[in-house]
Image: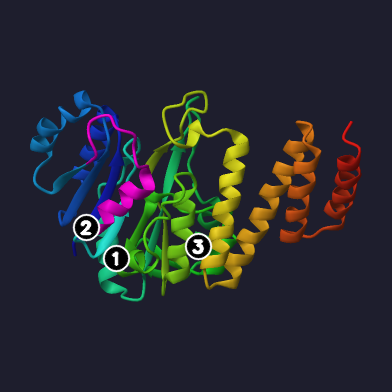
Amino acid sequence: MLISIIVPTRNRVALLTQALQAIQAQTHQQFEVLIVDDGSEAPTRALYPALLAQLGSRFRLVTVGTDGQRGQGPSASRNLGIRLARGDIVAFCDDDDLWVDASNLAAVAQLFAQHHGVDVCISNQRAVFVDGSVKENWLPGLNHRINTLPLLEDRFSAVTVADLCRSGGFAHLNMLCVRRPVVEAVGGFWEAVNYEEDRDFFWRCVDASRGLAFTSTTVAQHHVPDPARRVNVSSAIQQQERWLVAAMVSRHIAITVKSQAIAGLFLQHEGDLLRRLALHCAEHHQPRASLALARQALGARFSLKWAAYCAWAWVKSLNPF
C-alpha cells in the first residue's frame, strides 16, 4: 500500500531536512514524499539537489513559481501535492515539525489494509512551545477515554463523529492519514484561507468518511510557532484578523458538512468567535461594529445574557461618546 506524504515548504531548508530525515526512517518503505517548494529564495533552492540525492528517489521536489516570488500559501501547495500524489493514502507533515515514531506508517498501512471501512486515521502528537513547555496529549479528551473505545486492532480504536465533537480539538495534519477518495471527495484544502485551513480540511474529511480510527500513540512532534516572530503564516495574522478568519472557516465547515453534529458544533464556535470580536470592537471604541457583530453572535448562539449585551451595545451605538 503506497502512502503519499505532502510536505509544503518555503525558505526553511534546515528544518525541512530534519523533517524529511525523520520520514526516511519509517520502517514501512512503500511511501512517496512530495516536497512542494512555494517560491523559496534562490540560495534555498540551490541546496535541494544535494538533499534529494541523500534522501533517494522516493522524495520528489515540486517547485512553484520563480525564485523568491510571493508564495501561493500552504493550502494551494498541499492541493498541488495531492494532485501529483500516486498513493492510496494521503498523509502530511509540516516542514518545521517531525515524525517521531518510525513504525507509524507500518501501523497505518496495516490498519487501512485490514479495515476497508476506515477512511481516516488519527494519531497523537506532542506540542513543544518556544518556552520549552510540552503538551503531551493533543486530543486529551480522546486520550483519556482510550480504554473505553472499541478496539480495532493493535494500537487503534474506533471513534465516532460524536466522540470527536466532544474531544475539544481537531487532528493536526502531522497526525492525520486519509484515504485518497475522501481527500478527493472534499476537494482537498479550501484555498481561500491559509489560516485554520487544517481544521477546515479535517472536519470535512471526517464528515465524508465511513469510519474513523484513533490511537493514543505519539507519532509526531509539533513545534508551536513563536508568537513574537513573523516567520510563518499563522503568527503573521493579528488577533482580530485571526478571529475573523476562524469565524469564516467555522461557517464554511457548518455549511459544507452533512453531519448536524459537526455543523452545530461550528455554528456555536462561530458564535463564540463573533462574541470575542464584538467585545474587542467595544474595547477599541467601535460601537457600531460591536453591535453588528453582537447581533450576528446572538443569532449563531442565543443566550439571555448575550441578548442583554446586544441591548447595551445598541444603546451605546446611539450615543457613542
Residue 68: horizontal and vertical position, in percent?
27, 29
State the image coordinates of residue 164 (x, y, percent, origin top left).
53, 62
Q: Amino acid at mark 2?
A: Ala
Q: CA distance from mark 2 to mark 3?
A: 35 Å
Residue 294 can be seen, yes or no: yes
The part of the image, by quadrant, that contains residue 288 is top right
The answer to which image quadrant residue 254 occupies is bottom right
Label disc, if present, on residue 147 of the rendered structure? 3
User: Magenta stretch containing residue 282, yes or no?
Assistant: no
Answer with left or right where residue 186 lies relative to residue 181: right
Label 3 – label 1 distance at C-alpha: 29 Å
Query: Which tag is nearer the camera, tag 3 or tag 1?
Result: 1
Q: Residue at x 48, y 56 (%)?
A: 200
Spatial CA distance of label 2 from label 1 is 9 Å
Q: Secondary structure at mark 3?
A: helix
Mark 1 residue crowding within 10 angstroms, few (<14) / some (14–19) / many (20+): many
> What segment is highlighted magenta in the picture?
64-85
Residue 180, label in figure: 1
Q: Residue at x 91, y 37 (%)?
A: 319
Q: Are marks 2 and 3 in contact (CB under 8 Å)?
A: no
